[in-house]
């Protein structure tokens, strides 16, 4: 079963206007399947095959002769030596959509793109599935089910797949495959403990010293591991809003796992009953809301900026802004929010210019949107991006 992705029009537009399009993202987000479906007339080669990767690296001229444009080159980061030859090929023939590249290790991939294909390539990112994308083909799914199952496409192409087993294998594959190529880790067990500790802190301010202490590693090691987790599209550090000179504003970022289902799995939440019983439900809900906003951002190629707001007395989970216009949102794990749930949002109006705030929302599990106060709406997850981004 194919699930349409909202990023598809953007990718088609980029391929029609640029000679090289690079699609990056975490493993198992559907990069290869999406490119092959959107561009069926392109050739295809995967550098996951060691023989293809070796020729692309050692003899790129012969490799490109065997796989002439237009072509999709999958997992292109395995042959960094290929990029200089792609530059030559593009400079000789700048037809748009000639080379469509995918990769899941952006540290190496982005370095190669910036060094060799600057001004020639467009870079897009594929996030896991959004709730709306899944609900379009599985209208019976609830937000609670989606949260604990996560957004990896394979879990919805065949709903008989057990999410717990899939995610367990995903973590093992990530540790054994991506991690070994990105960073030397003396103990994979220590790193897996770090993954779980990070998941338990999802939607919280990042305290590097506390995290390093709990994992039992040095601060420098923790910094390297965080960088790898972020670079491999497993984690995002959401920065606070600095647009006001208030001296008490928080300066630390918030840590979020990118996929709420993976975060739930690493926290030991394996089903809807577990979710309803755990004290982590609020943090996991906020993790899901953050992921949904980021997915919408990726589909727009980053037209809006996302932050959070926090000072000594006021906190708002998400502040979306562009050119002086703000949308504010709080994530609440409730089906029936009350007017007091809008208090934090309304306090920010004392700091931001009221006429600059276009909307304020409490994103919750209500089935339908409705006014919570005169200026704050209760909004379900499926309608959130209508309120925040005009989707």
Image (tube, rainbow, N blue to C red):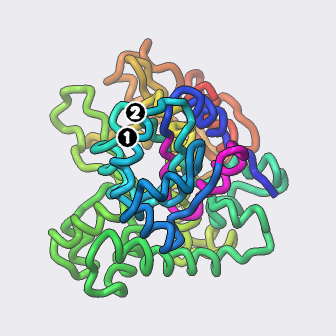
Please tell me whether residue 173 is drawn above or below residue 33 in the rendered image. Answer: below
Which segment is the magenta one?
A: 21-42
Residue 26 colored in magenta in the image: yes
Lateral position of residue 287 relative to residue 105, left or right = right
Q: Nearer the viewer, residue 209 or 168?
A: 168
Tell me the element at label 2: helix
Q: Position of residue 162 (x, y in %)?
A: 71, 77
Real-space CA distance between mark 2 and mark 1, rounded to the nearest whole angstrom: 5 Å
Task: Name the disc covering residue 88, or none.
Answer: 1
Q: Residue furthest top?
A: 355
Q: Which residue is mark 2?
A: 91
Q: Does 298 sit left or right of 83 as displayed?
A: right
Residue 41, located in which quarter of the rendered image?
top right
Quarter of the image with the C terminus is top right
Q: Is residue 280 above or below residue 374?
A: below
Quadrant (top left, top right, bottom left, bottom right) of the N terminus: bottom right
* Marks 2,1: beta carbons within 8 A: yes
Q: Nearer the viewer, residue 228 or 78?
A: 78
| Residue 284 seen in the current view | yes
Frontmost residue, 124 versus 205: 124
Residue 345: x %, y % from top left: 45, 33
Q: Quadrant of residue 387?
A: top right
**SS for tag 1?**
helix
Kindly identify the residue that appears in the image at 36 percent across and 16 percent down.
353
Badge 1: few (under 14), some or many (20 or more) residues near its Cα, within 10 Å? few
Q: Residue 129: where, in percent of width, then height?
A: 64, 52
Whole-percent x, y for residue 134 in the image: 74, 52
């Amino acid at each position: 079963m194919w699930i349409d992705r909202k990023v598809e029009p953007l990718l088609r537009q980029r391929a029609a206007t640029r000679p090289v399009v690079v699609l990056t993202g975490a493993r198992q987000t559907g990069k290869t399947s999406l490119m092959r479906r959107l561009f069926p007339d392109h050739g295809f080669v995967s550098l996951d095959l060691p023989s293809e990767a070796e020729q692309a690296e050692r003899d790129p001229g012969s490799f490109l002769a065997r796989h002439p444009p237009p072509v999709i080159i999958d997992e292109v980061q395995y042959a960094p030596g290929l990029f200089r030859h792609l530059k030559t090929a593009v400079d000789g023939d700048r037809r748009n959509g000639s080379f469509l590249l995918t990769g899941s290790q952006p540290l190496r991939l982005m370095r190669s793109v910036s060094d060799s294909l600057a001004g020639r390539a467009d870079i897009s990112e594929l996030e896991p599935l959004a709730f709306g994308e899944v609900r379009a083909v599985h209208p019976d799914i609830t937000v609670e089910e989606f949260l604990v199952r996560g957004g990896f496409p394979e879990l919805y192409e065949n709903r008989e797949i057990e999410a717990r087993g899939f995610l367990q294998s995903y973590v093992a594959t990530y540790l054994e495959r991506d991690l070994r190529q990105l960073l030397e880790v003396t103990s994979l067990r220590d790193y897996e403990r770090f993954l779980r500790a990070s998941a338990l802190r999802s939607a919280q301010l990042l305290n590097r010293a506390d995290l390093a202490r709990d994992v039992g590693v040095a601060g420098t090691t923790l910094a390297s591991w965080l960088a790898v987790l972020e670079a491999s599209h497993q984690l995002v550090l959401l920065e606070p809003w600095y647009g006001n000179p208030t001296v008490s504003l928080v300066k630390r970022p918030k840590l979020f796992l990118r996929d709420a289902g993976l975060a739930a799995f690493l926290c030991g939440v394996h089903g809807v009953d577990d979710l309803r019983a755990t004290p982590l439900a609020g943090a996991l809900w906020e993790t899901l809301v953050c992921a949904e906003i980021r997915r919408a951002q990726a589909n727009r190629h980053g037209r809006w900026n996302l932050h959070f707001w926090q000072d000594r007395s006021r906190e708002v989970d998400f502040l979306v802004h562009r050119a002086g216009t703000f949308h504010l949102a709080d994530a609440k794990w409730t089906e029936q929010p009350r007017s007091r749930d809008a208090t934090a949002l309304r306090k920010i109006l004392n700091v931001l210019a009221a006429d600059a705030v276009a909307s304020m929302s409490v994103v919750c599990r209500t089935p339908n949107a409705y006014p919570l106060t005169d200026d704050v709406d209760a909004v379900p997850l499926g309608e959130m991006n209508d309120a925040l981004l005009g989707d």
